[in-house]
Image (cartoon, rainbow, N blue to C red):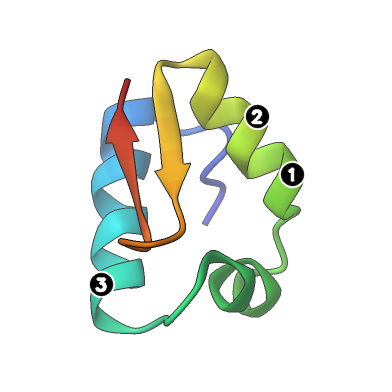
Amino acid sequence: MDFLNMDINIAYSMINMKLRDFYSSLDDFCEDMDISKQELIEHFEENGYSYNENTNQFFAK
């Protein structure tokens, strides 16, 4: 899946679901999906979201 090019709201929902149900960290998710963690975080930041390591989820700023 190309999370960097899909609608941000759909990507937000899908990634948070995957983080909640399948991955214990964003690092694990990015490694498994072959996505740059830095690019993903920057993309979400540009669209009004931040990542919280403690809750392992993105949230709206």
Is 13 on the left-hand or right-hand side of 44?
Answer: left
At horizontal 60% and vertical 28% (from top left) the residue drawn is 43
Instruction: Indicate the amino acid at tag 1.
Output: Gln
Label 2: which secondary element: helix
Other-residue count near label 1 (Cα within 10 Å), few / some / many at <14 / 14–19 / ≥20: few
Q: Position of residue 22 (x, y in %)?
A: 34, 84
Q: Position of residue 3 (x, y in %)?
A: 51, 45
Instruction: Indicate the amino acid at tag 3.
Output: Arg
Between disc 3 and disc 1, whose residue precedes? 3
Residue bearing mark 3: 20
Using the image, determine if residue 15 lies above or below residue 13.
Answer: below
Other-residue count near label 3 (Cα within 10 Å), few / some / many at <14 / 14–19 / ≥20: some
Do the numbered discs 3 and 1 sit on residues whose CB atoms are within 8 Å? no
Other-residue count near label 2 (Cα within 10 Å), few / some / many at <14 / 14–19 / ≥20: some
Q: Position of residue 19 (x, y in %)?
A: 35, 69
Residue 38, numbered circle: 1
Do the numbered discs 1 and 2 sit on residues whose CB atoms are within 8 Å? yes
Q: Position of residue 53 (x, y in %)?
A: 46, 59
Using the image, determine if residue 52 lies above or below residue 35.
Answer: above
> Which image quadrant for residue 16?
bottom left
> Which image quadrant for residue 57?
bottom left
Using the image, determine if residue 42 lies above or below residue 15.
Answer: above
Using the image, determine if residue 23 lies above or below residue 12.
Answer: below
Residue bearing mark 2: 42
Label 1: which secondary element: helix
Residue 15, numbered circle: none
Task: Report how far apart the C-alphas of labels 1 and 2 lie in the structure.
Answer: 6 Å
Instruction: Indicate the amino acid at tag 2.
Output: Glu
Look at the image and tell me in which quarter the C terminus lies: top left
